Amino acid sequence: MSETYEAERREVLRAVERIVAAGLVAGSSGNVSLRIATADGELIAVTASSVPYHRFTLDDVLVVDFDIEPVVGEGVPSSESLLHVAVYHARPDVRAVVHTHSVYASAFAAAGRPILPVLDEQVVILGGAVKVAEYGPSASEELAARCVAALGERAAVLLRNHGVVGVGRDLDEALAAVELTERAAKVQVLSAVLGGAQELPPGVVRTEQAVYRMLHGLGPE
Ligand SMILES: [Zn+2]
């Protein structure tokens, strides 16, 4: 019997259940993928397009190659599969990508404003401010390229007028990236009511950035 990559597909399904439980997605928006290295090349386990999350099952996690050609499953892969593959090409360290339209992060994306580092954990986990990628139409190659350019070596990026992408060495890290991005966005919106969030001191940001880079095996910036 040919390989069905059930373990990897189950991991993606568990990640979908987590973003639903965390209230980060609604309807069928957002998507999740996991990189799979095989002897014959690289694949991704990725969520199917347009399946409402309340009836999402293991059969809705497909496996495709880096040309988005089907390997396992019957459905249509996420329309943002191109973006996921572009991230995997650009970032050999990344094994998981999570994309959501969570409300507070999307508010920053709509306003075209980066989420500045105002919480200590933000820099250590995300690598610094969450930048905003230039606008690209959904599912387009431009969007994929602009996402990769704005992401750089960090763990999260905003897609202008669209949503947020978190990446990590596994799904836990990618989930943590989108969860923390959403929380940091929410904190900044609420802080505005209190006169505005104060940025972390520059020295602290530099030190924490060095910690992020060390934890991710990156050289000095
Ligand atoms: Zn989207």
Image (cartoon, rainbow, N blue to C red):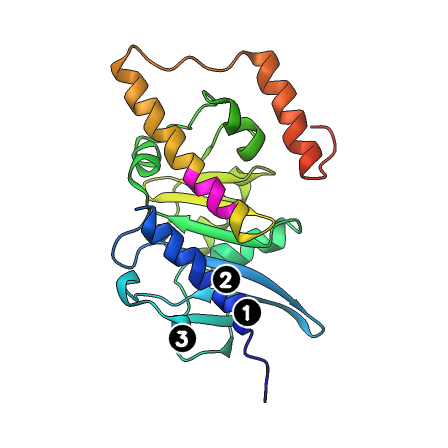
Specify the quadrant of the image occupied by residue 118.
top left
Q: What main secondary structure does the magenta stretch of the protein show?
A: helix
**Which stretch is magenta?**
174-179
| Residue 67 point in image, percent of width and height | 55, 69
Other-residue count near label 2 (Cα within 10 Å), few / some / many at <14 / 14–19 / ≥20: many
- Seen at 37% across and 48% down, the residue is 100
Q: Is residue 219 magenta?
A: no
Label 2, label 1: how far apart the Cα atoms are: 6 Å
Residue behind mark 3? 59
Is residue 80 in view? yes
Q: Residue at x 46, y 72 (%)?
A: 62
Image quadrant where one finds the N terminus: bottom right
Secondary structure type for disc 2: helix
Classify 2 as above or below 42.
below
Residue 73 pos. (x, y %): 45, 78
Task: Name the residue beneath numbered marker 1.
Answer: 7
**Between residues 6 and 29, which one lies in front from this camera angle?**
6
Calculate the distance from the C-alpha at mark 1 to the C-alpha at mark 3.
13 Å
Tag shown at residue 160: none
Q: Mark 2 sits on what residue?
A: 11
Circle 3 residues within 10 Å: few <14, some 14–19, many ≥20: some
Earlier in the chain: of badge 3 and badge 2, it is 2
Label 1: which secondary element: helix
Mark 2 touches mark 1? (CB < 8 Å): yes
**Disc 2 marks which amino acid?**
Glu
Give me the residue at 47% from left, 61% from top. Answer: 12
* Residue that lies at the very extreme toward the bottom in this rendered image: 1
Marks 3/2: CA–CA distance: 13 Å
120, above or below 80, in the image: above
SS for dot 3:
helix
Mark 3 and ligand 1: say if the CB distance to the nearest ligand atom is below 8 Å: no
